[in-house]
Image (tube, helix red, strand yellow):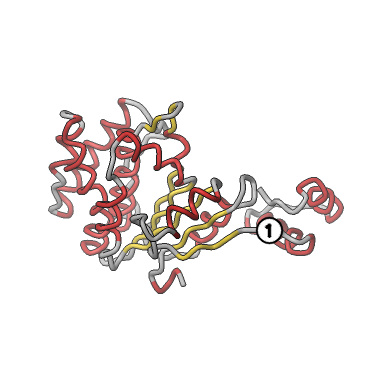
Amino acid sequence: MLLRGQSIAVIGVRRIGKTSVLLKTLKLTSGPRVYVSAEGYVEGKSFDLSSFVAYYSSLVISQALSRLEPNRRFPLTLKERSRELLRTLRDLLAYLKVTLDVNPVSIEFYFENKRRLGEALREVFELPQLLAQKIGSNFTIAIDESQYLKLAEQNHPGLFHPLRDTWQFQRNVTYLISGSSVGLLNHMIGSGDQPFYGFFYPVQLRSFSRGTLLRFLGEGLREEGVTYARGALEEAVNQLDGIPA
């Protein structure tokens, strides 16, 4: 389904393994891929959209550029909110102009003038498709705990409408989202009056059976090159009670 370009929403309670599913799915893709957790930008009852935009844009740009120059190390700070992040983004934007002749002016101007948020957001949303066409490789974008974007929409009404309008016409980008607020996310993607109605295919995660959880954990450990005793794995499964995370 993902290979056909169908965007997917992974829904389930906390610690059910949504993040593991997202990361495993990203590993199966061949093109540039981006993972970002929206939960890291929650501040009380608000959402730090500026930092989210900066970090998301930096990831998208650096992934595209690394496909063109796989041996080059592109700067990307591990701090998701900082002045260093903004400097990194400006450096990446400058390199993008030279390398791919792409000049996202609104994104640059936004960090000088916060009132230009609307213009910057549309350009940010369009970046993956634009860069996918430039480099000839499809993007996969994963946004974990995406229900927190609802906080951003409260501060910036109408945010989801231009997001859907942009995403639905992108032929070279597939989106994965996850959410642990099951009712809220089901409403966001399944109610006819919501912008994302019909866009995401919902995947509901349930607790694993004992046998499935043993296989899941065993495969994950082997992929990471970790040796383990069968008894220790069974004890871990007993403690997890069907929840792999």
Q: Is residue 120 above or below residue 6?
A: above
Q: Quadrant of residue 33?
A: bottom left
Q: Which secondary structure, mark 1?
A: helix
Q: In front here: 179 or 77? A: 179
Where residue 188 appears, as percent x and y from the top left, is: 43, 53
Count numbered badges in the picture. 1
Residue 101: where, in percent of width, then height?
A: 12, 53
Mark 1: amino acid: Arg
Q: Residue furthest right?
A: 231
In the rendered image, which quarter is residue 219 located in?
A: bottom right
What residue does disc 1 label?
222
State left or right for residue 108 relative to residue 138: left
Q: Residue at x 54, y 46 (%)?
A: 181
Apparent side of residue 109 relative to residue 48 in the rendered image (left or right)? left
Closer-to-camera residue (62/197): 197
What residue is rendered at 30% in x and 33% in y?
Answer: 50
- Seen at 55% across and 58% down, the residue is 24
Q: Residues within 10 Å of mark 1 (few under 14, many from 20)?
A: few
**Residue 124 rendering spot, x and y as whole percentages:** 25, 47
The image position of residue 53, as x and y in percent, is 30, 40
Left or right placement of residue 235 versus residue 189 in this view? right
Name the residue rendered at 15%, 41% in the picture. 106
Which residue ends up furthest to the front in the rendered image?
Answer: 193
Front residue of this view, candidates 234 and 243: 243
